[in-house]
Image (spheres, rainbow, N blue to C red):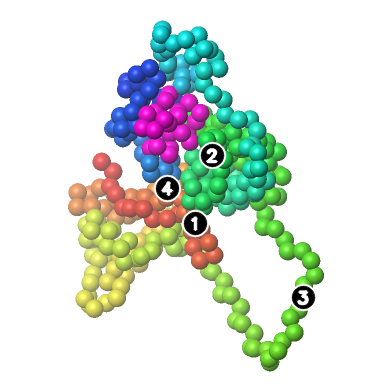
Amino acid sequence: MLTIQEIARVLKPGLENGRISLAEAERLLLETKDFNLEEYGFDVLADFLPSLCEDFELDNDVVIVSGKTLEGLVSVEKSEEKSPEENSPEEKPKLPAVPPEGYDVEDMNKSLAALIASSGNEYVPLTYLGQAIKQKGIEMPAGIKLRVCLGWSPDIFVQELRGEGVYFIALTPKGKEMAKPARKTGPVQTPVPSEPSAAPAAPAKSIAMSRYALASFCVIAPVNDFLAQLAGIAEPDGWFVIDDPAEKQPYRLLLRKLELDFALAMRDELEGRESPFRTGMLRGTYRTNFHDASGKTIYMEMEFNSRRDASTMAPWKFKRFYVED
């Protein structure tokens, strides 16, 4: 992932008076080796840049870059024809320091605190939080950056700028308390049955999870598509046999080998030996024991499972198989 300063360096050749078209910015960034928009949790550059920091603004299809806090990497030239009023320090309108009148800040704080707590991490990237807000449909004040909204409640949210130039957000003790589900209060009314009571419902079935089970680590549904993709890349060496075309699970031997390899790899990880796992905040990889026809190792790429629930508690979600160039 690129830092804010590195992104500014990439955009700098295309800047004219501190502005660059969105199409040109997208071309420059996508041609950059270490830039992958999906790693930031975004699909569209127009959503990503304004959320990255206050130095990137979007005016229709034009990206406006400010060099005020980018350590002089980008200098915004000012026209000599501008009036003194236009060249004044107050030229750039400041975002409101207080919430808009009538906006429910307390409700916003509860929603954002619940999102951060549900991630399972103490700190989450600001870009991850912005994407989660869009997915959940949480209404935010129009025209006000997320960092400003978080700044309204320093007793609930902690903002930390990491060395890679990305803001991370955490909860204070008060914020963690706010994120807990509200407890029901008041007397419990017992309804009077008008008919004989039905037989008690069977208790909910508990979900078995094992640190050695692939399914507890990564969501791989639909499993046939998952195995078909691996079988299309991997070079058979005796593990892949379809002995009955009518078999509903023709890849069962392939899955069996993958699950066994994963369990052994997890044992090595837990016992401190060389690990085949590489995980970050939003992306992870697992080095499998399969190889392609040229002998290159096949990797399993995963993305953070932000929609975990009682049926899918796995922290990761399968994305693709690939071999390194």
Please report whichever mark, 2 or 3, sits nearer to the chain's N-terminal start.
Answer: 2
Residue at horizontal 67%, vertical 57%?
181
Question: Which residue type does callout 4 highlight?
Answer: Gly
Q: Alpha-carbon distance for marks 4 and 3?
A: 49 Å
Specify the farthest residue to the bottom. 196
Residue 11: x and y, percent?
A: 36, 25
Question: What residue is pinned by disc 3?
Answer: 189
Tell me, for residue 69, which label it has, or none: none
Secondary element at image label 1? loop
Please report whichever mark, 2 or 1, sits nearer to the chain's N-terminal start.
Answer: 2
Tell me, for residue 307, which label it has, or none: 1
Q: Does the residue at mark 4 contact the one at mark 1 (Cβ under 8 Å)?
A: no
Magenta residues? 45-65
Specify the farthest residue to the left. 293
Give the image quarter of residue 10.
top left
Residue 154: x and y, percent?
A: 68, 36
Q: Is residue 60 magenta?
A: yes
Question: Which residue type does callout 3 highlight?
Answer: Gln
Residue 58: x and y, percent?
A: 42, 31
Q: Using a 10 Å C-alpha cutoff, classify the residue at mark 2 as few (fewer than 14 neighbours), some (14 to 19) or many (20 or more).
A: few
Tell me, for residue 142, which label it has, or none: 2
Q: Using a 10 Å C-alpha cutoff, classify the residue at mark 3 as few (fewer than 14 neighbours), some (14 to 19) or many (20 or more).
A: few
Question: Which residue type does callout 2 highlight?
Answer: Ala
- Nearer to us of marks 2 and 3 is 2
Residue at horizontal 23%, vertical 52%?
292
Q: Using a 10 Å C-alpha cutoff, classify the residue at mark 1 as few (fewer than 14 neighbours), some (14 to 19) or many (20 or more).
A: some
Question: What residue is pinned by disc 4?
Answer: 284
Q: Alpha-carbon distance for marks 2 and 3?
A: 43 Å
Front residue (pair 192, 83): 83
Q: Using a 10 Å C-alpha cutoff, classify the residue at mark 4 as few (fewer than 14 neighbours), some (14 to 19) or many (20 or more).
A: some
